[in-house]
Image (cartoon, helix red, strand yellow):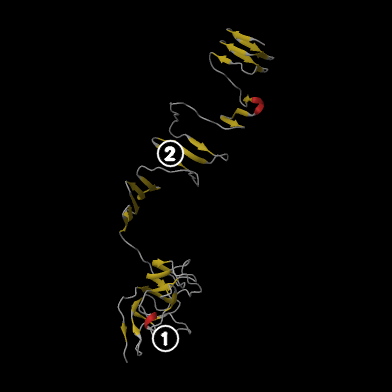
Amino acid sequence: MGTHKINADLDVNGEVQGTSLDINGAADIAGNLVVSSGGDITCGDDLFMPNGGIINFNSGDVTVTHASNQLTVAGGNLFFNFGNGNYNTVDGTTILDSEDNDLMSFGEQAVTFSATNVSIGGTLNVAEDIVHTSDADTKINFANNVITLTAGNHIGATLRATGTTISKRVFDITSSTDGDAIGDIVYFGSTTSMQPGRIYYFNSSGNWALADANAESTAKGLLGVALGSSSDSDGVLIRGMVTLDHDPGAVGDVLFLSDQTVSSKFGCAKNSAPSGNGDIVRVIGYCLHVSAGNIFFNPSADFIEVTA
């Protein structure tokens, strides 16, 4: 099996073997074309393969198969190495998954990802905007040391190296669930077994305890509403919308820290000022619902001690 250089047409029904084949004419081979390891096949024109034809590398380790106008590479990894050149695709080219679902398509200066999820293992570099589909006025904009969040053409927040600007805070009335809250929430105090929807004060031990207008030490300091059993995990609301576990009054009522127990428990609000000797009168917010326990919690820094 030496070198075969063929300048005329080659029509073989059997097998052609050699270390190198150099064919300048037309080759019609019905059998096998065998080139030993390290040999070359040089074609002066086109190489034609039949439908279902297979180009086989290393006894089947990698194959390239054509069938029904589809080219399949199997058995290994497909690498494109164009050096310093470019890989050009026509507009409308689409990459599909094994079930023929669109994954990625290429248009004029645009790449569209159609997959349900897109995972990026490294850094995503964005020159300017991330825009919501078909909603150009809802986006995330990036500039030098600035991130701007826009929804419906309204700038909701701007994050700078020096801090965050929130142009408008929206506080909806909370649900009827005890401890549901929207507002300023803190997570400290290492206090457990708290009662969601009850009012607590931050004590000298660094914990939260149920507030009571009958005792000055429990009524004049930092107040908050428990949002769950744990201060550190569930949080304590210190200002905002919240749902108490009791009904403190009627819609629009001014609310005070209560000097009474509700269901034999402290930490409540009511719509009348306490009047007993030594009681602390302190406005803590406003009632938003007649029966659901919804209030705007905003404790005043001022208080009055009753002398009766």
The amino acid marked with disc number 2 is Val
How far across and how far down the image is residue 143, in percent? 32, 46
Query: In the drawing, does residue 60 fall left or right of residue 191?
Result: right
Q: Which amino acid, mark 1? A: Gln
Q: Is residue 270 visible?
A: no
Please tell me which residue lies in front, 170 or 265: 265
Q: Which residue is mark 1?
A: 260
x and y, in percent, of residue 254 in the image: 33, 79
SS at circle 1:
loop
Specify few, some or many for label 2: CA neighbours under 10 Å numbering under 14, 14-19, or 20 or more: some
Looking at the picture, tell me which residue is in the foreground, 188 or 299: 188
The residue singled out by tag 2 in the image is: 111
The residue under the point 57% across, 29% down is 71
Image quarter in which the N terminus is found? top right
- Work out whether 262 lies above or below 164: below
Q: Is residue 308 above or below residue 250?
A: below
The image quadrant that residue 67 belongs to is top right
Rendering coords of residue 22 (x, y %): 58, 11
**Residue lying at the far bottom of the rendered structure:** 308
Q: Which mark is residue 56?
A: none
